[in-house]
Image: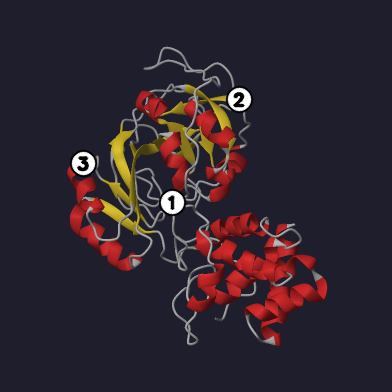
Amino acid sequence: MAADDEARAATARPHTPPGRGRRLAVAGLALASAATLIAGVVAAVTLEQPPTRAAAGTGAPAGGPTGLPGGPVTSVIDTRQVAPLRRVIPPDVLVVGTTGITPQQVQRVRRIKGVRDVGLVDGGAVQLRSRLINTFAVDPSAFRSWTPPATARDNALWEALAADRFVVSPKARRELRLNPGFPYPIVARTVPTVTLGGSGDLGLPGIDMLVSKRTGEQMGLVRDIALLVNAPRVDPARLTRSVEAIFGGTAKVLNLNAPQYRQAASYLDLYRQAARRCPGLSWTVLAAIGQVESDHGRNAGRSSAGALGPMQFLPSTWRHYGVDGDRDGKADIMNPYDAIPAAARYLCDHGAGRGGRSLYNAVYAYNHAHWYVQKVLDLARAYAARYS
């Protein structure tokens, strides 16, 4: 159960803008320009580069280009409703096709033993403020379940998307200096001007923007180009091999549970959410325990003592403290959406919310070793200093 002294988070390389006449491409981990391959690019499906007179990247928020295919589109919030969040679905595999994914392929994936959910989306690489940005075009009512909990529960974000505004990751918003409520030209096959509706952690490596399906159609994004697969009780490597066999080299299949794709940042969001279940308990304590126990899910297998999952519960303890955090009807010891709130529940029942000596005793109850308590508390202080 060894761990690093601080949390590690995966980072994506900056997007590379396409040159004149260069085609945009859909790619796997990062959808990217086919001629300037970004790390992690795995497949290419071309979209025509729009006319070179397109005005993307000028920084002027209002008044999109005119005389171009599709014309300017200015979006406003309307009264359409988004379906309420029923549950959160952690994606285990991402499939990106070289052409659209067929209904027959989707049905074959559904028939893999253990597959619970699949989600099909449109996508492509577009240009925003002179930068290439990887984009999914989605139904907000359906897709919200595939995002991290805090994002999935942000109704305002999904209502904005349903009203044909666009949504970006915090990284994209920061790097591109985007302001919510401002319209921006987006360069694809057409150059619509779309208003930024907000930002949130999208939870998929390399994907930094969402638009509605209607906006995606206007932009000319590729239909049914990506498939998300959830199979919580299937070994991720075996699931990946089964999906690869279906696509036979016509798509890139990414195991999102592999260390290079699993991001500690997503876990930090779960720690913050779970800590709210226990007033007085800092999320940093949960993060520290998650790091020591499994390095944020990277080593979630059975321990020598028989403990399992990202928070390393004994099955006997899990039967009492297990939580259905993603509201899928099951409390899964291997699922971080369930295991992390279960750890918060355990600590809270042992007095962690009172702090001081009570917190020390609660962590000691979690693992009966004084060195363990000291390591957890030291890491918690490091998290507090880093993320304050």
- Dot 1 lies on which element? loop
Q: What residue is disc 2 on?
A: 182
**Residue 295 appears in the rendering:** no
- Which residue shows up at 38% across the image and 61% down it? 232
Residue projecting furthest to the front: 320
- Dot 3 lies on which element? helix
Q: Are marks 3 and 2 in contact (CB under 8 Å)?
A: no
Q: Tag 3: residue type?
A: Pro
Where's the C terminus, which quadrant? bottom right
Q: Which circle's residue, 3 or 2, is located before the other in the chain?
A: 3
Q: Which circle's residue, 3 or 1, is located before the other in the chain?
A: 1
Q: CA distance from mark 3 to mark 2?
A: 38 Å
Q: What residue is disc 1 on?
A: 89
- Which residue shows up at 35% across the image and 30% down it? 49
> Residue 103 bears which disc, if any?
3
148 lies above or below 54: below
Mark 3 or mark 2: which is in front?
3
Q: Which circle's residue, 2 or 1, is located before the other in the chain?
A: 1
301 lies above or below 304: above
